Image (tube, rainbow, N blue to C red):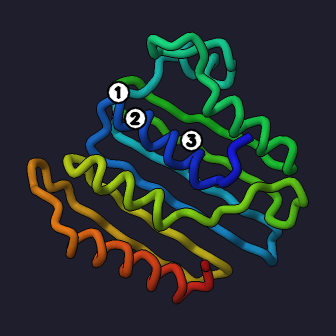
Amino acid sequence: MMEDLSLHILDIAENAIAAGAARVLIAVNENARRDLLSFRVTDNGRGMSLEEKERALDPFFTTKRKRTGLGLPLLAQTAEVCGGRVIIESVPRKGTRVTARFRFRHIDRPPLTKMTETMMMLIFGHPEVEFCYRHTRNGLRFIYLRRAFPGRATASADIVALRDSLRAGLKRIGVS
């Protein structure tokens, strides 16, 4: 099991980019009243065939050169242990949506604490990709949109500005 749910989000987004996505939407919803934490990663990559989609949660199936694909199976196992589930929707040549749901207060649910770092890694690691990050916590919403900037050099001021923007936006909605 991964120690932080943000690492699962990072893994899914990286897989989307490897599948040719030019746009990735990451939506997180924390709702203590409804005892629900969910996240969704939607992309416009190559999508999955029916066979790939049916086998996506099999730890011994991968489309990569390595012999196992543990990201989605581990996420699904974690979600099930925490009273939730993983849903995969995909259309070939259109893209994929992965949704994970957890009981918010489940004792075994890993935390979701590193979203600033996760988004920074994605944005600066893939300047050619457009990212939309939407985080809702108990009805309060933060949205960050980053247009693609292929070939643009990253200045240290850009890194600090993004980090500060993400931290301030998440703090405003009660995410520490």
Q: In the image, residue 44 lies at what x, y percent? A: 34, 39
Q: Amino acid at mark 3?
A: Val
For the residues labelled 2 and 3, the Cα–Cα distance comes to 10 Å
**Disc 1 target residue:** 46
The residue under the point 14% across, 55% down is 149
Q: Position of residue 82 (x, y in %)?
A: 85, 50
Task: Pick out the residue farthest to the right.
Answer: 107
Local secondary structure at mark 1: loop
* Residue projecting furthest to the front: 156
Pointers 2 and 1 in contact (C-beta within 8 Å): yes
Quadrant location, the N terminus: top right
Residue 111 sits in quarter: bottom right
Pointers 2 and 3 in contact (C-beta within 8 Å): no
Q: Count residues near mark 3 (Cα–Cα under 10 Å), then give few for <14, some for 14-19, many for 20+.
A: some
Which residue is outermost to the bottom?
172
Q: Amino acid at mark 1?
A: Arg
**In-image side of 125 versus 151 (left or right):** right
Which of the 4 image quadrants contains residue 154? bottom left
Q: Which residue is mark 2?
A: 95
Q: Amino acid at mark 2?
A: Gly
20 horizontally vs 5: left or right: left
**Horizontal side, residue 159 vs residue 16: left or right:** left
List the residue tagged with mark 3.
98
- Residue in the foreground of this view, choosing between 121 and 55: 121
